[in-house]
Image (cartoon, grey):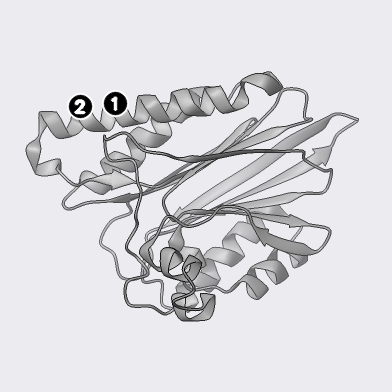
Amino acid sequence: MTLKLRSIGTSDRGLIRSGNQDALHAGTWLVAVADGMGGMAAGDLASAIAIDAVAPLDAETPEDALVAALQRGIQVATTRIRQAVTEDPQRQGMGTTLTALLFARTGSCLALAHIGDSRAYLFREGVLKQITRDDTFVQMLVDQGMITPEEASSHPRRAVVTQALQGDEVSPTYATMVPWAGDRWLLCSDGLSNVVGPETLAEVLAQHPDRAECARRLIDLALRAGGPDNVTVIIADVLDED
């Protein structure tokens, strides 16, 4: 049995923002979402830099080289963002989240890299699990037992990230997992996860086997909830194509 990753991604400006500072890559071996931050055009530049830096990883990679490849991609992104800020000091403070999943050429392993508050969810055998942990102020409060996860979802400071790619040295989270045939991955910016709850996400992932239809439905739900932010969605299915 040889497992393959099949993905589709889509992004929407939302109903409030004047531009879209999200960027994505939905490929054969790599899927990634970046959500930019910073004034003027700096946020969309930062997210584009991050995706451009990791996009070359969309190639056949041995199992034992997955995490190192993602680390290199993030290092390239960090260097390029630092250069962009040096070139124009008005870009100071720009940055981006990055959540990326790299599938091994054998199909027997995948690696995940994460920084910021874009998310990766795994829908396996009818159960949705959030795999990434938000690098945010409110997640820190949840971890310390000061607020509940329910309170975090409506906290006024829920958009404050504690880590992002901004040109400085950072400590992204890396993990490796064994994929199963039938797994469905959802990668998204907080424009989706802040307004559509996990129960609804699970419902949609279960009810729409067609990836493009599933992604479109999730975007529509975010827009119906007010679309206060840019919304980016990637649906990636692990398939047995033998």
| Residue 140 image point, x, y percent | 42, 63
Q: Where 161 falls versus 75 (above or below)?
A: below
Q: Quadrant of the C terminus?
A: top right
Q: Which mark is residue 79?
A: 1
Crowdedness near tag 1: few (<14), some (14–19) or many (≥20) residues, C-alpha within 10 Å:
some
Residue at screen point 33% across, 40% down: 165
Q: Amino acid at mark 2?
A: Gln
Seen from the viewer's position, the closer of residues 181 and 161 is: 161
Q: CA distance from mark 2 to mark 1?
A: 6 Å
Q: Where 34 falls versus 80 (above or below)?
A: below
Residue at screen point 19% across, 31% down: 84
In the drawing, does residue 193 fall left or right of residue 3?
Answer: left
* Residue 1 seen in render: yes
Seen from the viewer's position, the closer of residues 10 and 97 is: 97
* Residue 61 seen in render: no
Residue at screen point 17% across, 53% down: 39
| Residue 210 image point, x, y percent | 73, 55
Tell whether label 1 touches label 2 (CB within 8 Å): yes
Q: Amino acid at mark 1?
A: Thr
In the drawing, does residue 180 fall left or right of residue 236?
Answer: right
What residue occupies the far left of the structure in this picture?
89
| Residue 112 image point, x, y percent | 59, 39
Seen from the viewer's position, the closer of residues 67 and 90 is: 67
Residue to which mark 2 is pinned: 83
Asked which secondary structure carries label 1, the reply is: helix
| Residue 3 image point, x, y percent | 81, 33
Crowdedness near tag 2: few (<14), some (14–19) or many (≥20) residues, C-alpha within 10 Å:
few
Seen from the viewer's position, the closer of residues 159 and 238 is: 159
In the drawing, does residue 56 fall left or right of residue 138?
Answer: right
Residue at screen point 8% across, 38% down: 89
Asked which secondary structure carries label 2, the reply is: helix
